[in-house]
Amino acid sequence: MALTIGAPALAEDEPRFCPTRPSIGGSSCTTEPGRVHVEASTLDWQRDDQSSQREDRIVTADILTRVGVGKNTEIQFDWVGYGRDRTRDKASDTVDTVTGTGDMTFAIRQHLAGAKGKAFSAGVQAFVTAATGRYPVGAGTWSTGIIVPVQYDLTEKVAIAVTGEADAAANQSGMGRHLAYSEITGLRYKFTDQVTATAELSLERDDEPDQHETMALAALSAAWRPTKVVQLDILAAAGLNPASPALRLVTGGAILF
């Protein structure tokens, strides 16, 4: 009887380990007070192949720290430790390479609805990015935005998620901001308690003053949790129209302290 009664108690004591990565969408799950999530990309490579140029960007040591400050509230600090951007002009065959650190982002996430065992969950996250990095590794000026993630568990293994985002995004000139907004729809499948996979579709409208663009991406990611507080993951994304980056590959993981 003691063992039977104790089993549910142990389950309740399991840590709330909910990395946002590797999904390109958002999450409403927050870190428990007094605990810290650390998420990092070991390698993030993106290729943007346009008619006039080809751009390859490599980012490493992109570190996100999430700190629980309330029952349903967390603060976040994200910093890109190193980036390398290589642009080749196809007409002249000249190459321009920029290296350095990236920008720093501060965010607050609030869980609004949903609890363990409930199918529906929702939250909101506001952020501001400081231009601590050099363009094009960094944005060149500050930006801000808001993210609203919603998720519904269709079954114990299948969940659908929708993330809406609206930003005052930095202009490519490094001066001023413009409106950018997006919607990401994802379907997650839970193979086991340790292995999950997510398929996502992203549509983004970027009203850059010199060039208005609509970008479409498809992404597939997988995560493996060898322990209850460690995750390793991988993501691959492909552009679905000429305005989108052609390919992106990301590897990394997360740990809960």
Image (tube, rainbow, N blue to C red):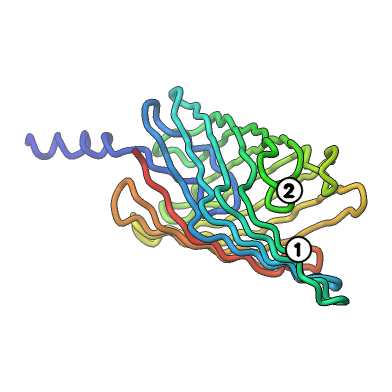
- Quarter holding residue 165: top right
SS label for mark 1: loop
SS label for mark 2: strand
**Residue highlighted by disc 1:** 244
6 lies above or below 233: above
- Label 2 crowding class (10 Å Cα cut-off): few <14, some 14-19, many 20+? some
Q: Nearer the viewer, mark 1 or mark 2?
A: 1
Describe residue 126's horizontal placement relative to residue 152 as left or right.
right
Q: Residue furthest right?
A: 210
Describe residue 164's horizontal placement relative to residue 230 as left or right.
right
Q: Looking at this view, is 226 or 124 the one in front?
A: 226
* Residue drawn at the location 68% of the way across and 61% of the way down: 85
* Residue drawn at the location 57% of the way across and 29% of the way down: 108
* Residue drawn at the location 60% of the way across and 64% of the way down: 45
**Residue highlighted by disc 2:** 182
Q: Looking at this view, is 76 or 111 the one in front?
A: 76
Name the kind of residue labelled 2 in the image. Ser
106 lies above or below 85: above
* Residue drawn at the location 78% of the way across and 68% of the way down: 241
Report the disc number at residue 77: none
Tell me if label 1 and label 2 are in contact, CB under 8 Å: no
Relative image position of residue 257 (x, y in whole percent): 34, 38
96 lies above or below 101: below
Name the kind of residue labelled 1 in the image. Ser
Q: CA distance from mark 1 to mark 2?
A: 13 Å
Counting residues from the start of the chain, the first of labels 1 and 2 encountered is 2
Residue 197 shows up from this direction: no
Relative image position of residue 194 (x, y in whole percent): 34, 57
Relative image position of residue 143 (x, y in whole percent): 74, 37
Relative image position of residue 19 (x, y in whole percent): 46, 46
Q: Looking at this view, is 197 or 179 the one in front?
A: 179
Q: Quadrant of the N terminus?
A: top left
